[in-house]
Image: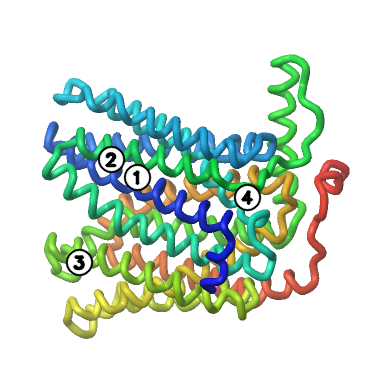
Amino acid sequence: MWTTFRNRNFTLLWFAGLISYSGDWILRIALPITVYKMTGSASAISLLFIAYAIPSIVLGSVAGVFVDRWERRRLMVITNVLMGLAVLPLIAVQSSGWLWLIYLAAFIESAVGQFFGPSENAMLPLLVEEKQLGSANALNILNNNLARFVGAGIGGVIVGTLGLEGALILDALTYFAAAGLVALISVTSKPNVQEQAAHALDALKKVGQDWRIGIRFVRHEPVVRLLFLSTVLMAIGEGTIGVLFAPFVLDVLRGGEAGVGALMSAQAIGGISSGVVVAWIATRAKPSLLCGFGALTFGLIDLMIFNYSTFVEGFAIAIVLFVLVGIPAAAAMTGLQTIMQLRVPDELRGRVFGALGTTFGIFTIFGMAFAGIMSDSLGIVPVLNIQGFAYTTIGIMGLTLLHRQMAEATPVEAIGEIQTA
């Protein structure tokens, strides 16, 4: 597993992602605290998260088209620099009268960030050998959990001691540092695309054509189509837990506000430890089995978390289960991402990952809406069980349909096969 870090280019990308995502978490902790202190309004915080969410729906899939047309290393450098510049104007914010600037900066930062994730996922298979791809994806998941643990912790401390200005400066510096690391990568990754259009209108038509080809590929490739269905179920489940996590801890587990923080920390610790375990497993297991067993185990542990308090009491049980659930969660995501990277041709990879992000964003909001509407009538636990059943279903599909299709289906090798389909 650790031999993957001997690859200089992967190590540069890994640390760039760690630093950049840590910056994301610093800001996403600092801004809600600042907005709440200024307004005392939960609805003001809701508008902030809406500003973050809209770009993933509107731009996620379109961003993938450009990822497949531009040199990805340069694109990641540019996006990090732009995200750093986007947050600096917030230093001027002094009162609630400047909330519009906070919302605008959050929207711009999120919009620019839509180009970074697909670029990273599309470039990774060019940096490591195929046999190391599963391990590299697992290490990237470890990366994301480390960023969450470090960035969220630093963000809370910095905004409490140095104020929003200190958090903003540190956040901007993380983006600039990440841009510098990506610039040192020696592998270029511009896909083999057709000639550029001569006029702006022709270029716009070409973008639309490229986007349609990406969507057609998803419909044409049965393995990828099944992964998109899994993503829909996953997003609905994540939407429900996103809305009902705090009410569950406060009203069902009786853990108090400190309990909410304790479970968030336990989740991060589980994610960090899982990255090491799954990176080792990923070199020895087929990605379809990794996805299937991971999702099934994740779903079953989720159901235990949501329902154990009906039979026994003890907040410590929840902490242990939250740590444990990180391992199968990382396994499921590692398997899913590895399959996507193996089944999608390089020239389509950016737009397919972009479409995957858009799909996740849309159905996450659907899950949030469902949880907000139905929890009052059905109760918190029954609605939360949707997440457990969703992941259990994904696991069963992974061990049956997905595993069989991976063995039988021939992957599309080139964009021409889709254009003529």
- For residue 380, above or below residue 239: below
Q: Name the residue nearer the viewer: 320 or 363.
A: 320
- Residue under label 3, please give it: 262
- For residue 27, above or below residue 207: below
Helix, strand or loop at disc 4? helix
- Residue under label 2, please give it: 170
- For residue 345, above or below residue 48: below
- Residue under label 4, please give it: 123
Give coordinates of residue 72: x percent, y percent: 62, 41
Q: Earlier in the sequence, mark 4 or mark 3?
A: 4
Dividing the picture into quadrants, the one containing residue 203 is top right
Give coordinates of residue 303: x percent, y percent: 37, 75
Helix, strand or loop at disc 3? helix
- Residue under label 1, please give it: 23
The residue depicted at 39 percent of the width and 71 percent of the height is 326
**Kind of residue at disc 3:** Ala
Q: Are marks 1 and 4 in contact (CB under 8 Å)?
A: no
Q: Earlier in the sequence, mark 1 or mark 3?
A: 1
Image quadrant holding the N terminus, namely: bottom right
